[in-house]
Amino acid sequence: MAAPAPFQLNGILAPLRDDDLRTIAADLQEAPFGIGDIVYEQDAPLERVFFPTTAVLSVLKLMQSGAAVETAAVGREGVVGFEALFGAAAARDKTICQVPGMTYTMTVERFNDHVRDVAAFRQAVHTYCRLLLEWLAQSIACNRLHHVDQRCAKWLLTTQDRVGRATFPMTHEFLSMMLGVNRPSVTLAAADIQDAGFIRYSRGVMTVVDRAGLEGIACECYATQSRAFADSLRGPLADGKAGPA
Ligand SMILES: [Zn+2]
């Protein structure tokens, strides 16, 4: 069997048959992002969609106070910019790169064409949209009810699932934006988790050293939310064992 193409690391593209994949791949281009790079500015024209493979992108809600809080993160299980399907002409929220890596991109026009013409692709995109809505609903409840230590553990596990490796760049400032809490709270939560021996954090690099330990302190939402995307995250990078430690 032929080795999978790099874009098949994305969970929406991976299950497609060869003929469908060839049709869609003809319109894909590589689009690497570095940490903090801007994918969309808020209200910018929505011209391209992005399928992450090794990058994780973060959708941020910007408030009038200047605060920015992550509302969704998208890794190799998903696609950003899909709202173009439903008529969106502009990006409602700012999207930045949270974990550096590769994405594959195509124009909104070709994305809409393929969703219309390729049934399996349409189904994969629709399934992702449904799962993301469920994810967002769970996150609303999680943010309301669960302690920052639990949410921090959930976020670390989720990020490891998405990048497929135990080590990834991360700053406390970024983590506070992801969790929607102030930086001292994040620093305390991360210190608790590091003192327990579950992570190692040094000079902007996070290493998960004890997944089972993190799973033990994460809230129930990790199991619920990770189950939703389990099929999309299964593959060459699955279970966090592949890739550099
Ligand atoms: Zn929770």
Image (spheres, rainbow, N blue to C red):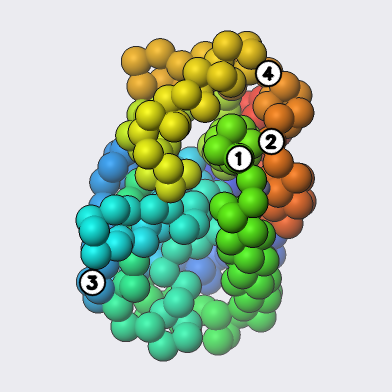
Q: Amino acid at mark 1?
A: His
Q: Are marks 4 and 2 in contact (CB under 8 Å)?
A: no
* Residue tagged 1: 147
CA gap between label 1 and label 2 equals 9 Å
Going 55% across and 38% down the picture, which residue do you hit?
A: 148
Q: How many marks are shown on the rendered structure? A: 4
Mark 3 and mark 1 in contact? Answer it, CB < 8 Å: no
Mark 3 falls on what kind of element?
loop
**Label 2: element kind:** loop
Give the spatial CA distance, label 3 vs label 1: 34 Å
Mark 3 residue type: Ala
Q: Position of residue 26 (x, y in %)?
A: 44, 66
Q: Which residue is identified by label 4?
A: 210
Give coordinates of residue 32: x percent, y percent.
33, 45
Q: Which residue is mark 3?
A: 44
In the structure shown, which secondary structural element does the residue marked by tag 4 occupy?
loop
Q: Position of residue 157 (x, y in %)?
A: 62, 35
